[in-house]
Image: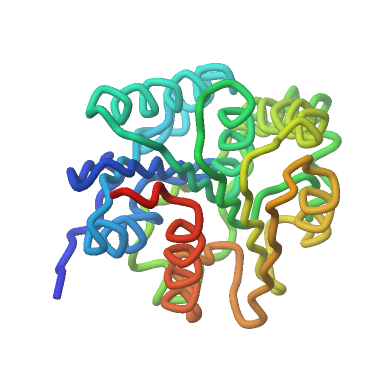
């Protein structure tokens, strides 16, 4: 049994020639993806979860980054896997990480995308007023902790810069327009009880992507942090099954 100290640091597991890039969400860290990373490592894959710029440090540092900086972290993560002579690379993105995964799939060679609770629309209606509110309220304070089985495994910020939410909005708008260009095999996963994004985002992604090999899967008893919630074992098995279907048969 793996005992892992909670940490926002990136992690890398060297395995076979199928690489898996794990991309965490907005204000999150690789900590929320570590159980999935360990699961995939135990199945023999090479796994890398980079830490996106401005994350895992302080809200002030996040405030000084843009979505292009987050994107650059993803590119560097992809290139690290590529440097290990991978025969193919799958990308798995949670929340904002899903947006960056689709952005990557349109610009690099990717064997498949697994999108976990990826936002096209946020649940909080105030997000659309951020360009104005940021001049009066520089930070949005984190109000409620998650359930203990989730809270105990994440490294959250206590407040979020509104300028960073504006950057997230810009990324959502850009990727929404790019979704119809995605042609690689795609698994869209969405929790029914997502408290952060509107679940109809998953329907939009599934309906708009160009890939003929696309699937959508709903989790009835999970929240936004689906990789740490009650149905995570079922989720991990579904992710593995998807990868097996599309990985190179000669490995």
Q: Is residue 25 left or right of residue 205?
A: left
Q: Is residue 232 above or below residue 71?
A: below
Q: Is residue 182 left or right of residue 85?
A: right
The residue located at (50%, 27%) in the rendering is 109
Q: How many marks?
A: 0
Q: Is residue 112 above or below residue 201?
A: above
Where residue 130 sits in the image (x, y, percent)?
78, 32
The residue located at (84%, 44%) in the rendering is 208
| Residue placed furthest toward the front | 250
Q: Is residue 85 above or below residue 23?
A: above
Q: Nearer the viewer, residue 160 or 32?
A: 32
Q: Nearer the viewer, residue 96 or 153?
A: 96
The residue located at (80%, 25%) in the rendering is 131
Give the image's coloring scheme. rainbow
Where residue 233 sits in the image (x, y, percent)?
42, 77
Q: Quadrant of residue 5?
A: bottom left
Q: Is residue 145 above or below residue 103?
A: below
Where residue 55 sits in the image (x, y, percent)?
42, 34
Where residue 133 sits in the image (x, y, percent)?
79, 31
Q: Is residue 152 left or right of residue 195?
A: left
Q: Quadrant of the N terminus?
A: bottom left
The residue located at (59%, 75%) in the rendering is 222
Q: Nearer the viewer, residue 107 or 30?
A: 107
Q: Is residue 32 left or right of residue 204?
A: left
């Amino acid at each position: 049994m793996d005992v892992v100290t909670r940490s926002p640091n990136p992690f890398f597991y060297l395995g076979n020639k199928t690489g898996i890039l794990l991309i965490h969400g907005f204000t999150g860290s690789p900590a929320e993806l570590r159980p999935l990373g360990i699961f995939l490592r135990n199945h023999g894959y090479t796994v890398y979860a980079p830490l996106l710029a401005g994350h895992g440090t302080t809200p002030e540092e996040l405030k000084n980054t843009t979505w292009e900086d987050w994107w650059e972290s993803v590119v560097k993560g992809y290139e690290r896997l590529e440097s290990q002579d991978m025969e193919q690379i799958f990308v798995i993105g949670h929340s904002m990480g899903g947006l960056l995964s689709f952005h990557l799939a349109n610009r690099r060679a990717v064997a498949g995308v697994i999108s976990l609770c990826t936002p096209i629309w946020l649940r909080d209606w105030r997000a659309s007023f951020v360009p104005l509110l940021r001049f009066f309220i520089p930070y949005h304070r984190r109000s409620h902790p998650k359930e203990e089985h989730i809270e105990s495994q994440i490294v959250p910020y206590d407040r979020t810069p509104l300028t960073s939410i504006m950057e997230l909005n810009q990324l959502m708008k850009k990727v929404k327009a790019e979704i119809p260009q995605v042609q690689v095999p795609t698994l869209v996963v969405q929790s029914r009880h997502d408290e952060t994004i509107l679940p109809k985002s998953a329907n939009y992604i599934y309906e708009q992507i160009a890939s003929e090999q696309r699937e959508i899967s709903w989790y009835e008893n999970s929240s936004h942090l689906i990789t740490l919630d009650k149905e995570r074992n079922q989720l991990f098995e579904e992710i593995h099954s998807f990868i097996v279907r599309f990985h190179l048969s000669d490995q």
